[in-house]
Image: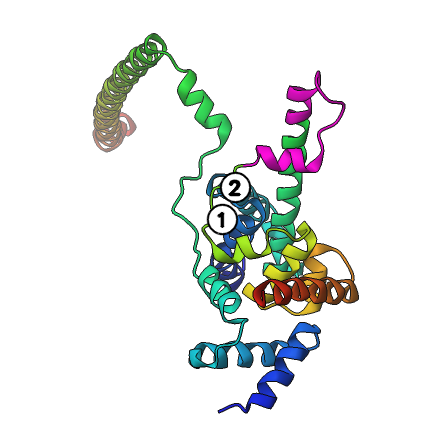
Amino acid sequence: MMEAAELKRLLEKYYAAETTLAEERALKQYLEQHPAQQVSEQPFFQAVNEFKLLDTPIQEFRTSSSESRIHRLSVWRRTLRQVAAVAILALTTVAISQSYRRYERNKAEALLQQNVEADLMRISNLLNQADANLNNAVKNAVIPGLNN
Amino acid sequence: MNQSLYEKFLSSQSKLYRFAYSLAKNVSDAKDIHQDTLIKIWEMREQWERWENMEAYGMRITRNTYLNFQKARQRRLHLELGELTEKPQPNEIEKHMVIDDLKHQFLSMIQPLPQLQQNILYLREVEELEYKEIAEILEISASQVKVYLFRGRQFIKTNTQK
């Protein structure tokens, strides 16, 4: 327990603004724990401690400009905005479906073209084969006959 | 952004609000000052790493925001009373301030003191800051802080011993 003389000395030092933060904390803590000391400073230190408990109130952070913009919008303007939003949504849906249909059509056309090209290639190969057979026949049968 | 600095920013909010409240002495103005301060600090987040003491810097911004707030109020009042008086006196401005929360014993105890002494007493007694930190926040010298603290405490002594 702090002696009365020590308490007096600390209080004098405190009022002369000569105390360190550690001394001030010790002084306040001692007086808080020993309310029976009946020093006249008690109410002030109690008030300081009470004020330390003050905390930030929950508040909405909204800029004044956005607030005024919200208030300024009239009913018809809000309705107009809703109609515009619905129209944009509908147009976007139509554009997407058309684009999808065009993609499907292009895909089918590409497949068809690929099939046609494959068939043409097959015909060309057959023609080449027939040509080669004909050349062989001529070489084997006609040319030796002519030589004889 | 450095995570620990962001956490420091978040944790200093209560202190900044308390300081704003001790300056404005009413919830409504304190909220406005606090919000403006937080926005300013957030906008300067690129500089956080260069700040030695974020709390002290935040408190300085709080005080400057409060002073600007007061100047704006003074200008408004000047416009309102322009026809009657040339320039409103400080006590006249205080009459127009909403001091709705002097239920806080601490604020009512220091209320008769000049603003600077109130600020110093608040920063030393409530926030327990060193003279150097208080000097940095209030943009005065550490020896001035000590002198004003001495006067403020003498006032408290006289009034509590009555």
> Can you give x and y, in whole percent of width and height, for residue B92 in the image?
65, 33
> Can you give x and y, in whole percent of width and height, for residue A146 in the image?
27, 25
Is A119 placed above or below B130 here? above
Which secondary structure lies at badge 2? Answer: loop
User: Which residue carries the number 2 mark?
Assistant: B99
The magenta stretch spans residue B84:
yes
| Quadrant containing the N terminus of chain B in the rendered view | bottom right
What kind of residue is marked 1? Answer: Leu
Is B67 placed above or below A108 here? below
> Can you give x and y, in whole percent of width and height, for residue A125 in the image?
24, 29
What kind of residue is marked 2? Answer: Ile
**Quadrant position of residue B88:** top right
Residue sitting farthest toward the front? B162
Residue nearer the viewer, B3 or A24: A24
What range is drawn magenta here? B76-97
Residue nearer the viewer, A74 or A125: A74
Residue for point 68% across, 66% down? B154
2 and 1 marks in contact (CB < 8 Å):
yes
Disc 1 packing (10 Å; few <14; some 14–19; many ≥20): few
Residue for point 23% across, 27% down? A118
> Can you give x and y, in whole percent of width and height, for residue B19 in the image?
55, 53
Seen in the image, is B91 located left or right of residue A3?
Answer: right
Instruction: Using the image, name the chain to which the residue with label 2 belongs.
Output: B
User: Which residue carries the number 1 mark?
Assistant: B102
Disc 2 packing (10 Å; few <14; some 14–19; many ≥20): some
Q: Is residue A37 visible?
A: yes
Give the alpha-carbon distance from disc 2 to disc 1, as whole Å. 7 Å
Q: Is residue B127 visible?
A: no
Instruction: Using the image, name the chain to which the residue with label 1 belongs.
Output: B
Seen in the image, is B3 located left or right of residue A102?
Answer: right
Which secondary structure lies at badge 1? Answer: loop
The magenta stretch spans residue B31:
no
